[in-house]
Amino acid sequence: MKVAVVCANGRVGKLVVKEAINRGLDVTAIARGENKSAAEKYVCKDLFNLTTADLQGFDVVVDAFGAWAEEELQNHTKSLMHLCDILSGTKTRLVVVGGAGSLYVNPEHTAVVSDSPDFPPQFLPLAKAQGKALEELRKRNDVQWTFISPAGDFQADGERTGEYILAGEELTLNSRGESIISYADYAIAMIDEIINGNHIQQRISVVRK
């Protein structure tokens, strides 16, 4: 299976590359600077300059784009829609690193995590930007996409336990009442989804077991 990881130099991207290689996948890292990932195959190119030809032949493309500066938050939607446009009508699957703020907190799916009055205000702009990207992605019936939300406490340096709970659109807690997952365990879940492909045109979520 041939996998391209876009924005592979980010903290999530590098772990996804590493996990994919360890699982025997044929991985190409794509980023705009020097290769900082474990991939031997590398394409130095800005995401917004990628074309359909650049991604031809891949079974799966991982979108690991991330932006935190307020002036760049709009690029969550813009970058995702660009990848959708160049993958439109192809068999290549698009697996997206999402956020937790857009997970629903009620069965009616009318309220999300970021609507909570105790949601950290410093993360609200990012959560809203990622939620907007998901909203636009849901409209794309021409792309074989999967959006994977992490748990609420997404820990960059957290332990790699090798276990996780696969959940759906609603915020899910583990047996200890936690919404937490490490980047490393998230990468495991992403590679499992890449290999299995069980959630096409769906948003799923993961939490530490």
Image (cartoon, grey):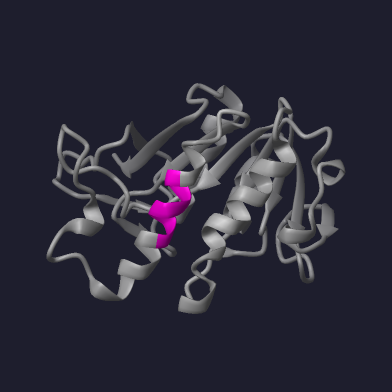
17 and 71: which is toward the camera: 71
12 left or right, relative to 121: right
Q: x, y (%) of residue 163?
A: 38, 38
Residue interval drawn in magenta: 129-135
122 and 136: which is toward the camera: 136
- Which residue is depicted at the point 73% across and 30% down? 59
- Which residue is depicted at the point 70% across and 34% down? 88
Relative to residue 94, is residue 181 depicted above or below? below
Q: For residue 62, which quarter of the picture?
A: top right
- Which residue is depicted at the point 52% across and 39% down? 190
User: Would residue 117 be seen by someone viewing this image from the given angle?
Assistant: yes
Q: For residue 144, which quarter of the picture?
A: top right
Q: x, y (%) of residue 83?
A: 67, 47
- The kind of secondary structure the magenta stretch mainly shows is helix
User: Would residue 18 be seen by someone viewing this image from the given angle?
Assistant: no
43 and 159: which is toward the camera: 43
Q: x, y (%) of residue 138?
A: 46, 37
On the rendered image, what quadrant is the C terminus found in?
top left
- Which residue is depicted at the point 62% across and 38% down? 94
100 inside magenta stretch: no
Relative to residue 131, is residue 36 depicted above or below? below
On the rendered image, what quadrant is the N terminus found in?
top right
30 left or right, relative to 63: right
Q: x, y (%) of residue 96?
A: 54, 45
109 and 57: which is toward the camera: 109
